Image (cartoon, rainbow, N blue to C red):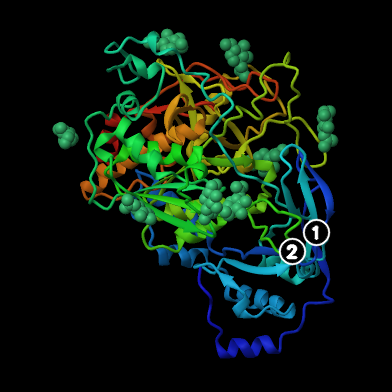
Amino acid sequence: MRLALLSLPFAAALASAVPFKGYQQKVKESIYSPPSGWYKHAPAPKHHLLELKIALPQLKFPELEQHLWEVSDPSHPRYGAHLSKQETEALMAPHPETLDIVSNWLASHGLAEEDIIRSSANDWVTIRVPVGLAEEMLTTDYHVYKHAQTGESIVRTMSYSLPESLHDHVDLIQPTTMFARFKAFKSTLHQSNHVRPAASSPSGSTITGPAGNQVDASCNDTITVSCLRQLYNAVDYNTSATNGNTLGITGYLNESTNNKDLQQFYKLQNPSAYGSNYTTVLIHGGQNNQSYEAAGLEANLDTQFGFGLTWPTPRTFYSTGGEPEFDSDLLTEGDTNEPYSYWLEHVLSQDTIPQSISTSYGDDEQTVPRSYATRICNGMAALGARGISVMFSSGDGGVGDGVAYPDKPLKHQCYSNDGHNTSMFLPVFPASCPFVTAVGGTVNIPEIAASFSGGGFSNYFGRPSYQDDAVSAYLATLTPGSYKGLYNSTGRAYPDVSSQAASFLVVYQGQPTPLDGTSCAAPAFTAFVSMLNDARLSAGKAALGFLNPFLYSTGYKALNDITEGRNPGCQTEGFNATVGWDPVTGYGTPNFEKLKDLVMAM
Ligand SMILES: *[C@@H]1O[C@H](CO)[C@@H](O)[C@H](O)[C@H]1NC(C)=O
Ligand SMILES: *[C@@H]1O[C@H](CO)[C@@H](O)[C@H](O)[C@H]1NC(C)=O
Ligand SMILES: *[C@@H]1O[C@H](CO)[C@@H](O)[C@H](O)[C@H]1NC(C)=O
Ligand SMILES: *[C@@H]1O[C@H](CO)[C@@H](O)[C@H](O)[C@H]1NC(C)=O
Ligand SMILES: *[C@@H]1O[C@H](CO)[C@@H](O)[C@H](O)[C@H]1NC(C)=O
Ligand SMILES: *[C@@H]1O[C@H](CO)[C@@H](O)[C@H](O)[C@H]1NC(C)=O
Ligand SMILES: *[C@@H]1O[C@H](CO)[C@@H](O)[C@H](O)[C@H]1NC(C)=O
Ligand SMILES: *[C@@H]1O[C@H](CO)[C@@H](O)[C@H](O)[C@H]1NC(C)=O
């Protein structure tokens, strides 16, 4: 982010700006009710500060998207010709007239250029204003909403308006109607469900892994760095520390990665990495607190496996703040937005970005307004255009809330939030964005689908053409009439791929701690992508960038197809894993040597 300089002619224009007050106001966005779990508590205190993010239309996004398809399609002559920061920003920038009109509107409410923070591409404007002023600008009333189960409080509104003449110049303003909370997808609930007694696998014994090679039998009980390398056929591959390849792991929600734990993990699982460090990037109040009590299970998991698998590849941990909570006793405490926009603003403003990035957070798609999800998804497309492979875990609720069978006393929570309260599966965002690679989960050897593996169909994003054949073929295998009305058969389907996702042996506060969840799968899969990028960069080739066009055209041939298991949720059995692509495990788990042969031939 940078502060834009105020040029003189522009200042003069501002001085003579016609105030927007009194103009015809028109509702810009509204929601019917707060999502399940939230209720209206009290009017928001007028002095509470809101950090409002205003998204200005990215006029040339269709052009950016066209570049993305070309540079990501292995059969296109431009494959690998990724865009620079400047080229990408030029395609994300708003029209100059939009900049003027929005500045005039802000000026009419007393906000000068120095009160405004602009993103590097000028496509986001950030302002800090008290609730009272925001209410005036947006013709709305903010309230404190509380979450019944967790007690969290946030300041939001059901609807906001803008002068009609501004509608074409603003995509969205948040926080207004967004209630997303961006959970981590590791599960502490079934923390040791999959851990079997060590006695079940006598040491030294082996079993056949998915690539046909012999792997330690203990890998069927507990997943380690060595197990993943064995299972996914990368035992002998050494990465370079100096070929320009780097790996990124993102963290949110105050999750800190504890260095003492990391070193202990290295000692146990990859002794050659012991003593090595990583780069920490703190964004928007993010922290990486090294006190033992502050260690985060998710951050420890993601960095330990991501870094442990790929060492000595240089590595970065991003910690992005964006506190979703609001303490109604602290009137001026910042109540900020969801954090992906801050992370995207930061990385897109950098000249170089890690080529492979893993994120294990997300939330129900319907809690993110469509306009916002679209903008975040566009940011992922921009990363793809720049040659970055972006992985997200697919969620831990199967087709929805993870509530399995009709005989369970627990009621499912799979209802639409559009005022109709219709039963539906709950897709997860950002996994549902067509510009990311969504990673589902498997368990056991031979591998079967993890029952929690998030999968399904977006209600916001249409099916991208790269997956047309794969998804049509899957839909044809469904028992006719199954789940009619519960899922959107024309939506972007996910996950794309998968990885082992249970009994990952993480070190947490000094203790080896087994974890389950697609949070395990995303950094694991990303590590193998990073190794593929390593091989390509060492050979002077471009990074892989956005993976899906490759995966769906040829890459799937080098993935282990998972054909058993299902992902129950919403009191249904969920979808079945099948031969070929399925909305439980995607195309399956990596076979590194085979993938390497494919990507080195491109
Ligand atoms: C990888 O490094 C190890 C340890 O230095 C070495 O023994 C092994 O031969 C290397 N593998 C390859 C394929 O170069
Ligand atoms: C995150 O850290 C900040 C600063 O230490 C603290 O005020 C806040 O309560 C923390 N939030 C959570 C969810 O732990
Ligand atoms: C590791 O890197 C962090 C910053 O990324 C730094 O604060 C810390 O001192 C480093 N630790 C060691 C042991 O070098
Ligand atoms: C780090 O975490 C500890 C334990 O949770 C807490 O006491 C301390 O205040 C935190 N430090 C910072 C700078 O937030
Ligand atoms: C939606 O319908 C379900 C089942 O009829 C009910 O339990 C739930 O309370 C309803 N939710 C809302 C917000 O009306
Ligand atoms: C791995 O564990 C699962 C679950 O206990 C079991 O069904 C399977 O037979 C085991 N695999 C092998 C090769 O023993
Ligand atoms: C289904 O997905 C399409 C995008 O393919 C979207 O336009 C439509 O609104 C979705 N339908 C529902 C009911 O969400
Ligand atoms: C999943 O497979 C079972 C049989 O193995 C079948 O009864 C069921 O209908 C299938 N589910 C769907 C959604 O096709």
Q: Amino acid at mark 1?
A: Ala
* C-alpha separation, residue under disc 1 versus residue under disc 2: 7 Å
**Residue 289 rendering spot, x and y as whole percentages:** 48, 50
Q: What SS does tag 1 mark?
A: loop
Q: What SS does tag 2 mark?
A: loop
Q: Amino acid at mark 2?
A: His
Residue plotted at (52% across, 63% down): 92
Residue plotted at (64% across, 69% down): 127
Instruction: Identify the residue under disc 1.
Output: 44
Is residue 265 visible from the viewing direction of this image?
yes
Foreground residue, 66 or 305?
305
Above/below status of 125 relative to 452 = below
Above/below status of 479 relative to 132 = above
Where, quadrant-wise, is the C terminus in this rendering?
A: top left
Above/below status of 428 relative to 246 = above
**Residue 582 rendering spot, x and y as whole percentages:** 52, 26
Left or right: where 239 falls relative to 523? left
Residue 245 disc label? none
Foreground residue, 168 or 10?
10
Residue plotted at (76% across, 24% down): 411
Q: Is mark 1 within 8 Å of ligand 2?
A: no
Is residue 374 visible from the viewing direction of this image?
no
Residue 48 disc label? 2
Left or right: where 431 falls relative to 358? right
Q: Residues within 10 Å of mark 2 (few under 14, many from 20)?
A: some
Above/below status of 408 relative to 118 = above
**Residue 229 rendering spot, x and y as whole percentages:** 31, 28
Q: Is mark 2 within 8 Å of ligand 2?
A: no
Left or right: where 449 falls relative to 227? right
Q: Are marks 1 and 2 in contact (CB under 8 Å)?
A: yes
